[in-house]
Amino acid sequence: MKTLKGPAIFLSQFIGQQAPYNSLDGLAQWAAALGYKALQIPCNHPSIFDLEKAASSQTYCDEVSGLLAQHGLVISELSTHLEGQLIAVHPAHDIAFDGFAPAEVRGNNTRRTEWAIKTVKLAAAASANLGLQSHATFSGSLAWPYLYPWPPHNPQLLSEAFAELARRWGPVLDEYDRHGVDVCYEIHPGEDLHDGVTFERFLALLKNHPRCNILFDPSHLHLQHIDYLQFIDIYHSRIKAFHVKDAEYVTNGRSGVYGGYQRWIDRAGRFRSPGDGQINFNAIFSKLAQYDYDGWAVLEWECCLKDADTGAREGAEFIRKHIIPVAGRAFDDFAAQGDQRESVRAQLGLDKGA
């Protein structure tokens, strides 16, 4: 059995214009002081982490690792959530997502897709240069506008959407395979991979590609009323990354899982800081220990109520307390008596009167 690693923190929600949040050194010092052992680093802030340089320069990667080591930190994973999103964008979402891309490719779906694929591939090389085994991303979405359709489903439309999603990601996954890195898709509403069924559909089209894996975030499953513990039972062999994010769903008579276009704070389902919501993290950490998950437990903070710094401080201790140092031996090993085959067969009466 293996003990998972942590606590780690996803920097995306904390990067800002003011110190210590505007440099990797400042963020590292801040995170280490809170008790974190690793950083999950997004790739869309070149002033924090230069992806292109990391993909081409081992020296740069060694410098980044050395800087973090000075604070007692390592990198858990790199993240291309925004870049992965741009690999597949339905035209209905073009305006909303254009801002994630460089100015020179905005307004051109084809060029933006090509840029996104190239960028996510760079993260494969960068991850390898950093000695990382997993990478966090989004799948993007071509079929999401048709999630709850009227008129009813067009099966051919959905088949074409998933076939195209797999066609775009296939070469990317091959690139990660060449570098020995797993791609971990965050199962997330808004993405075509938003539950187990859609992940299975995608995986089948990719012929069970070994690098096609899952970033497990129970908050997104809970808000869809999916059994997140059974999800671990079903997909544990593909879970290679883990976001610790809490959520709550409070049934009411005015809105439901779709949110009613309301602010997060007013929705029936909303994200909370770890320990403030309804997620059973005791059971989650137990399940992950049972299935030998040895990756990182990474705080992703998106609480609609709590101050971010408070959430980060409390999150480190929350994760630390939930990590289960797995046993090196079974509690009843003391009763083991070696090879007892002959005496056991005699006890069962199997050698009498053949």
Image (tube, rainbow, N blue to C red):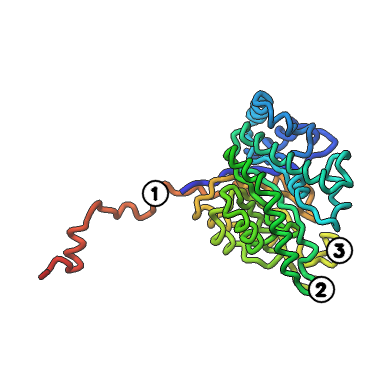
Could you tell me the amino acid type at mark 1? Arg
Could you tell me the amino acid type at mark 2? Trp
For marks 3 and 1, the one nearer the N-term is 3
128 left or right, relative to 268: left
How packed is label 3: few (under 14 Cα within 10 Å), some, or many (20 or more)?
few
Q: Which residue is mark 3?
A: 262
* Mark 2, secondary structure of its residue: loop
Q: Are marks 2 and 1 in contact (CB under 8 Å)?
A: no
At a point 74% along the width and 35% down the height, the residue shown is: 27
How far apart are the two marked residues, 2 and 3, measured between alpha carbons?
22 Å
Outermost residue on the bottom side: it is 253
Residue 338, compared with residue 269, is above or below; it is above
* Mark 1, secondary structure of its residue: loop
* Mark 3, secondary structure of its residue: loop
Could you tell me the amino acid type at mark 3? Gln
Q: Which residue is mark 2?
A: 150
Is 27 or 99 nearer to us in this picture? 99
Q: Which residue is mark 1?
A: 329
Q: How many numbered marks does the figure carry?
A: 3
Residue 274 found in image quarter: bottom right
For marks 2 and 1, the one nearer the N-term is 2
Image spot of residue 239 (x, y percent): 58, 52
Q: Are marks 2 and 3 in contact (CB under 8 Å)?
A: no
Residue 262 found in image quarter: bottom right
Q: Are marks 3 and 1 in contact (CB under 8 Å)?
A: no
